[in-house]
Image (cartoon, rainbow, N blue to C red):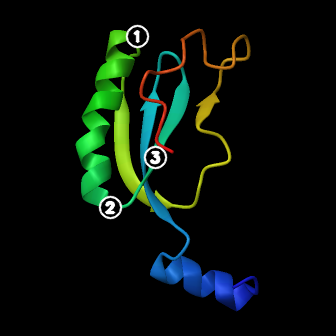
Amino acid sequence: MKTSFGRFLANLFGFGQDWWVEVQTSQPACTYYFGPFNSETEAETMKGGYIEDLEQEGAQSIRSVVKRCGHPDQLTITEEGDSPLGGFASPAFSGQS
């Protein structure tokens, strides 16, 4: 399904997409992606552990959403230029294989 129409159908019906937990924090200003998961229920179940880990590391204003999408280009996106992870160590729950 490499044609435009094929990609359209894949997106429409969710082929090639998995469930991911997207977590955004204001301090540090980061977006984290955890996954992939086979189901929304599995992602929802795991979400609390990721949030708890970030809270223990001092992250503030944590927002999260479970969504279905393709594999993110980056699993951690930071808006702070000093450190690749905004001064935080890599979260203990860094995803699944």
**Residue 45 in which image quadrant:** top left
Task: Measure the alpha-carbon separation of dots 3 and 1.
Answer: 20 Å
**Which of pointers 2 and 1 indicates the residue nearer the eye?**
2
Picture quarter with the N terminus: bottom right
Point out the tag, 2 or 1, that comes first from the N-terminus. Answer: 2
Is 77 displayed left or right of 48 in the figure? right
- Residue type for callout 3: Gly
Is 39 displayed left or right of 74 in the figure? left
Task: Estimate the x, y position of residue 33 in percent, counting from the top left.
Answer: 50, 40
**Which of pointers 3 and 1 indicates the residue nearer the eye?**
3
- Residue designated by label 3: 35
- Residue designated by label 1: 57
Q: Residue at x 41, y 15 (%)?
A: 59
Task: Measure the alpha-carbon separation of dots 2 and 1.
Answer: 28 Å
- Residue type for callout 1: Glu
- Residue designated by label 2: 39
**Dot 2: within a 10 Å radius of its alpha carbon, few (fewer than 14), some, or many (20 or more) residues?**
some
Badge 3 marks a residue whose secondary structure is strand
**Residue 54 in which image quadrant:** top left
Task: Estimate the x, y position of residue 11 in percent, counting from the top left.
Answer: 55, 77
- Residue type for callout 2: Ser
